[in-house]
Amino acid sequence: MSIAANIVIAIIALLHLWFLILEMFLWTKPSGRRAFGLTAEFAEQSKALAANQGLYNGFLAAGLVWGLCLGSVGFSVKVFFLACVLVAGIFGGLTANRKILWIQALPAAVGLVLVHLT
């Protein structure tokens, strides 16, 4: 695996760990509401859904870290989890907020390209 691919994968994993924290623990706090542009009322009403979404982001981060820990034999694991991130980013960008295309889908696409170039 190239160093660049592994760095991008690590950054994506860290991003998804941050999404987990925002969605599971900070959703109703000022920083979480500010990150997602939520009112206090909506954040309180949707906190269980956000926590569930955060858990899924944690699984994506764990899968990417698992792929990194496997080293060169983790190619398939990395590709699978990057593809999951890409699909989730495209879906979120089309249905929730276009920013998700840039924050989630684009890094995953870059990661997939870099993994396949090595």
Image: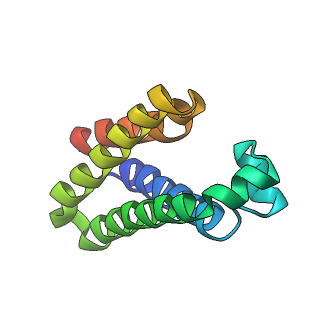
Residue 87: x and y in percent read: 33, 38
Q: Say how many tags the image has.
A: 0
Image quarter where the C terminus lies is top left
Residue 53 appears left or right of 40: left
Q: Residue furthest right?
A: 30
Residue at 71 percent of width and 61 percent of height: 44
Residue at 54 percent of width and 36 percent of height: 100
Q: Does residue 14 show up?
A: no
Residue 81: x and y in percent read: 29, 54
- Which coloring applies here? rainbow
Of the pair 26 and 109, the residue shown nearer to us: 26
Instruction: State which quadrant residue 47 falls in.
Output: bottom right
Residue at 30 percent of width and 35 percent of height: 113
Residue 110: x and y in percent read: 39, 36
Quick check: 70 above or below 60?
below
Instruction: State which quadrant residue 116 falls in.
Output: top left
Of the pair 14 and 44, the residue shown nearer to us: 44
Quick check: 36 above or below 77?
above
Residue 31: x and y in percent read: 80, 58
Quick check: 72 above or below 108?
below
Quick check: 48 above or below 43?
below
Image quarter where the N terminus lies is bottom left
Q: Does residue 45 show up?
A: yes
Residue at 74 percent of width and 62 percent of height: 28
Of the pair 116 and 62, the residue shown nearer to us: 62
